[in-house]
Image (spheres, rainbow, N blue to C red):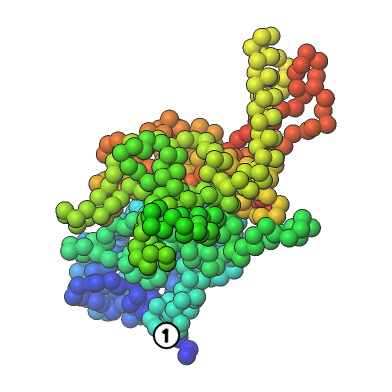
Amino acid sequence: MSISDDSFVVILVFLLKTKTSNMPNYKVNVKWGKEKYAGLELSTDQSPDIFKLQLFSLTNVLPERQKVMLKGVTIKEDWGKLKLKDGMNLLMMGSAEELPQAPAEKTVFVEDMSEDQLMSAMDLVTGLDNLGNTCYMNATVQLLKTVPEMDHALQSFSGNVNRAGLMASLGMTSAGAEMDDTVTASFRDLVRDLKSNEQSSIKPFMFLQLLYMRFPHFAEKNDHGQPMQQDANEFLTELLRICQLKLKAVPMDVSGGRPFEPRDNFVDQYFGIDYDIKLKCLDEEAKDEPEKDSKETSLQLNCFISQEVKYMLTGIKCRLQEEITKNSPTLNRDAKYSKTSKIKRLPAYLCVQMVRFYYKEKGQVNAKILKDVKFPMSFDAYELCAPELQERLRVARGKFEADEEERAEAQLAGKQSGESKKMQELKKKEEEPKEYERFDFPDDVGSNNSGHYELQGVLTHQGRSSSSGHYVAWIRKKGDDWLKCDDDIVSPVTSEDVLKLSGGGDWHIAYVLLYGPRRLEKRDRSVKPAAGGETASISEATPMDTTSTENSAA
């Protein structure tokens, strides 16, 4: 079935209409330079952005470059009091070519800078406009953007935002794979635009509409016709599932031998957690029932919050050692079992969900647990692991311990004799580009080979229930410097500010934490210790610079 460009535009606009009222639709003409487009559909029930998207598909002029006028009046964020009727002529100005290079700029003071100039001067990142309770989506995208390997995998994805996925949503083709292709391609393009840092903020309009088509429950509206708030962790899970299907696994160097556990996609490589499970029946009548071994996988650790839990590690342990009720084959009825989970494979990037929402019968809402639960900047998962994995982790952990000892000795020598030559060399070296040891096992790409992690992103929720409130992403820039990504507003914060997100009140509270692999700087092991006990080359264990796009594990 062949569909013309004009017909495709009409179908796209039709798809973007969700629960519209009976406001009038008009057929208008648009003149752009020497071109004239007749009979374009315009609805005043939709924002001018949708009409500009239609013009973009016809002229290739980006919406932000378009200036649409009616009788000398520029159409901005709404239609205002414009009197429209069929057959009216609109004028559009804007260039589809690259913008000309700006001349050399004179000195501009901070108070005279635009938002884009401020973003560049303060070395911030691009924000995302809120398109109607879409903070859950904005915060999740900013969080995942901190994973450089995911950016590399997305940019390697060859799919496009094409009409196949859009046609699938109308039932013209099979909806599954083609729609997932389109969502993945749109996610890739959005991350690429964010990484370019060309604007202070952008409108993720296309990505949002595709998500609404793929996951209709995210498009639900309240009684007032406004988009409803959604659960950010639910959205994170759905997005990772699509990426599981569409992002290929990073190839392993086959010279290192057979892979430890073959994985067929990027998400399982870099986010997948494997568990060894032991189930033991606690009922006295079934004390002879043998212990059952099994395996499980997940993309997150869960931190259960109870009255006794004050720290994240304690909450995770409660999840890994719990009592469940299941059918006993011995008793032929339900019985209580002890379920013990040990991690047999750690991923490079560890997602931890703070289980803060529960269903409250009174009021019938997903209420929120506000309890203060502390989380660390540096996390060691060693004691959560199975003995076999602990053995594999010891080699890299030994390197970290040796590094820390050498640094401590160098600092002590510096205190005793003033700032030594070695300390001066260290300060100079910190300004130079660094190279790191690989953080994964050679036979398991995307794993963590030490159990050491550094916090690189936090997704917070402010409010009393999952169906209301506001989500914000807090991402590590470098060292103790962080950025607060509150939709289109991005501002610098510190590690101290981030640690205050542990809960206890109505302030922003950590809901999802993203830990990345702690990095070990390469060092020259051939250099002998210098005279006076000073070491000639000392490395530093540092978290990954989340502004980098290098795939260090490949």
Label 1 element class: loop
Which of the two residues, 336 or 171, is positioned nearer the viewer here? 336
Which of the two residues, 552 or 397, is positioned nearer the viewer here? 397
The crowding category of the residue bearing disc 1, from other C-alpha atoms within 10 Å (few below 14, some 14 to 19, many at least 20), is few
- Measured as percent of width and height from the top left, residue 286 is found at 41, 58
260 left or right of 278 in image: right
465 left or right of 55 in image: left
Q: What amino acid is at disc 1?
A: Met
- Measured as percent of width and height from the top left, residue 371 is found at 30, 38
Where on the picture, by quarter, is residue 170? bottom left
Where on the picture, by quarter, is residue 212? bottom left
Q: To which residue does mark 1 refer? A: 172
The relative height of residue 189 versus residue 201 in the rendered view (above or below) is below
Residue plotted at (57% across, 41% down): 382
Residue plotted at (77% across, 24% down): 536
Residue plotted at (59% across, 68% down): 158
- Measured as percent of width and height from the top left, residue 521 is found at 68, 36
